[in-house]
Amino acid sequence: MSQLRDGFGALPNLVVIGAMKCGTSALHRYLDRHPQIEMSEPKELNFFFGPSTSAQDESHPAQERGREWSSGNWHRGSQWYSRHFRGEAIARGESSPGYTSPSHEGVAQRMARMIPAARLIYLVRDPVDRAVSQYRHHRSEGTESRPMEKALLDPDSQYLSRGRYYERLVPFLERFARHQIAIVSAEELLTRRRATLLLLFRFVGVDEGFWSSDLQRLHHCNGETAQLDSRLRRRLSEAFAHDADRLRELAGRDFPAWSV
């Protein structure tokens, strides 16, 4: 392992925990623009999931070894993780939407044990639009061949489970105090960026008066509304409705741009 860079070797105190296809890449860049916040490079460290031992040896096919990063980096240990953060930064963080994936149980428990005082940001989006975006992503990758309606309405698919934001947040609510978790929507980040970012700056404990023209530039933010058959949108809205209501109650506000 290479030698530590000067000043690096601290654990993070800020983690963007999700969700997939909600604009976490844009948020990661916005946070990193603040002079008192340093976000990791690469963005997704995927540290808190995966097995405790490495599969990176010659007994595994090269293709499998190449997938190890996306399968999780827990086996690399806390010293590896800390190499990505400078201790002198007031807020230092990373953004791994896989932390709230249904495939990765145990993330919240590991996180609470290692960084119990961390601030967590959960970025959400109209769950119908998020599901469509994920479907299109998988289609472009060649990992999804089913027609849209069949795939999106599959009760066992992650298209539905990843968009049940309250359900995915429960393990973190059980292990972190409510004031340690901020819920932000991609739509708010897109249409009310300055107000939303200033709230997040306050949340993570940095100068909330900071603003830069860089923050005003539009980065890819996954805020667009998907064009869907009205029947399919209605069925998807019904599938998400109960969870969306619970999230609104938890967040203490409505998400008026949502179709759910």
Image (tube, rainbow, N blue to C red):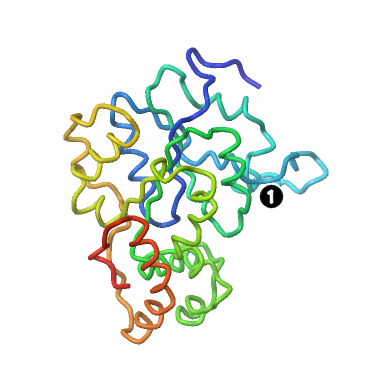
Q: Quadrant of residue 238?
A: bottom left
Identified by mark 1, the residue type is Gln
Q: Is residue 48 left or right of residue 176?
A: right
Could you tell me which quadrant the N terminus lies in?
Answer: top right
Q: Residues within 10 Å of mark 1 (few under 14, many from 20)?
A: few
> Dot 1 corresponds to which residue?
63
Q: Residue at x 55, y 25 (%)?
A: 82
Up-down relation of residue 91 to residue 129 (above or below): above
List x then y, in percent, for residue 70: 59, 47
Q: Residue at x 46, y 47 (%)?
A: 17
| Nearest to the observer: residue 234 or residue 243 | 243
Q: Residue at x 73, y 40 (%)?
A: 52
Residue furthest to the top in view is 6
List x then y, in percent, for residue 7: 48, 14
Q: Is residue 66 left or right of residue 46?
A: right
Residue furthest to the right in view is 59
List x then y, in percent, for residue 112: 56, 39
Q: Is residue 48 left or right of residue 248?
A: right
Up-down relation of residue 3 to residue 253 (above or below): above
List x then y, in percent, for residue 94: 46, 37
Q: Which element is circle 1 on?
A: helix
| Nearest to the observer: residue 145 or residue 207 | 207
Q: Quadrant of residue 245?
A: bottom left
| Nearest to the observer: residue 159 or residue 69 | 159
Could you tell me which quadrant the C terminus lies in?
Answer: bottom left
Q: How many marks?
A: 1
Up-down relation of residue 173 to residue 143 (above or below): above
